[in-house]
Image (cartoon, rainbow, N blue to C red):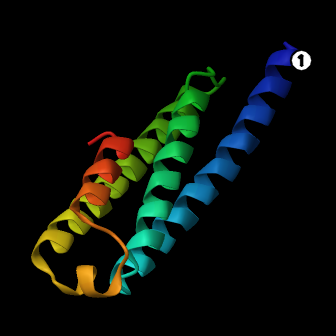
Amino acid sequence: PALSLEREAFSTQLWRLEDTRINVNLRLSERHLRAYRSSSAMTELRLSARILGDLSALLNVPFVSEERDRAMRRRCVRQWATLWNLCAHFSRSFASDVKWRERGHACGDDVGGLLQDVGM
């Protein structure tokens, strides 16, 4: 029992750190997208996908409280939705706005690779 409480405490703290990290990365992605920094945006979006993958693995650790478990899963789903929304916005904007090609260092293949990396 004491080991399971330690495990839950450690998992919860690790989850909170990763949760904060993904939120920071998603915010950075939004800023890079607004400033037409394609390389930086793609880097942050890829990193966000990796962190979310790690975060999803933490959700396989059963927590004592089912309510906390459901809340963490809902939050993770919302973060995936935000990530996919940012990627979709980036790909649509990249296809329709010439500024991306003028200011950035990316091409259509880079955007396609990003979407594959993120799992869209």
Query: Where does residue 55 sit, x and y in percent of width and height?
Result: 57, 39
Which residue is depicted at the point 47% across and 64% down? 26
Classify 43 as above or below 6.
Answer: below
Q: Nearer the viewer, residue 11 or 118?
A: 118
Determine which quarter of the picture holds residue 85. bottom left
Locate residue 7: give its quadrant: top right
Residue at (22% x, 62% y) in the render: 108
Q: Which of the two residues, 16 or 69, is positioned nearer the viewer here?
A: 16
Above or below, 53 relative to 22: above
Q: Residue furthest right?
A: 2
Q: Quadrant of the N terminus?
A: top right
Name the residue at 75% across, 43% down: 13
25 left or right, relative to 30:
right
> Taking 17 as reference, is 55 left or right?
left
Per the image, label 1 sits on a secondary structure element best described as helix
Q: Residue furthest top?
A: 1
Q: Residue 93 placed where, x, y %?
A: 18, 73
At a point 40% along the width and 74% down the height, the residue shown is 30
Which quadrant would the C terminus be assigned to in this image? Answer: top left
Q: Mark 1 belongs to which amino acid? A: Ala
Residue 58 at x, y = what percent?
61, 30
Residue count near mark 1 (Cα–Cα under 10 Å), binned few <14, some 14–19, many ≥20:
few
Q: Position of residue 45 (x, y in %)?
A: 43, 58
Q: Decide: is 97 above or below 10.
A: below
Q: Is residue 58 above or below residue 47?
A: above
Left-right relation of 18 to 84: right
Q: Nearer the viewer, residue 25 or 62?
A: 25
Which residue corresponds to mark 1? 2
